[in-house]
Image: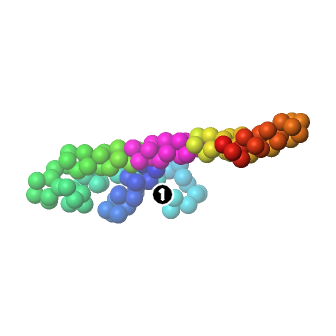
Amino acid sequence: MVETTLRGHARYLGAREVRPRNHSNRGRSTNTPTHLQTLRDVAFWPHFFSGLSEQESTRQEALQAVISDNNKAKAVEKFAVVVFKVSLILITIMNTVHNILNTNFSNLPLEDKLKIKELGRYH
């Protein structure tokens, strides 16, 4: 997810794709995308980041902005995983409680069933 975010930034900013220097892909399609020089290319476009003005921004500040975007994406991803796990645990607990409450006590004798029914009715 984070790599996709960086590639999206780079493609939006017109980053060029870097092709391998060796000719190991002879006979194959040359249209296959390879590594994008994301951080290096994005650093030349500091005006893309809203917190920085064109006059005062430097390459280092732009790199820091990309890194903070990266960290935010990682934090959001971790938060989503935690929320998903917690929801699964809550669903499991609710299902267990539901099953316990809806047990019909079918293996009990009739007088015990009647007692349970009376307890439930007048509770």
x and y, in percent, of residue 108 in the image: 86, 36
Give residue 12's quadrant in the image.
bottom left
Residue at position x 59%, y 57% in the image:
27
Q: Which residue is mark 1?
A: 33
Q: Is residue 41 above or below residue 81?
A: below
Which image quarter holds the C terminus?
A: top right
Give residue 120's quadrant in the image.
top right
Is label 1 in a helix, a strand or a loop?
loop
Give residue 100's quadrant in the image.
top right
Q: Is residue 107 above or below residue 51?
A: above
Is residue 54 covered in magenta?
no
Total count of labels: 1
Neighbour tally class for label 1: few under 14, some 14-19, many 20 plus, Cα within 10 Å:
few
What segment carries the magenta color?
Answer: 75-88
Going by the picture, which residue comes out furthest to the left?
55
Residue 45 visible (yes or no): no
In the visual, does 45 lie left or right of 92?
left
Residue at position x 47%, y 47% in the image:
80
Q: How is the image coloured?
A: rainbow
- Between residue 115 and residue 17, name the one nearer to us: 115
Amino acid type shown at disc 1: Pro
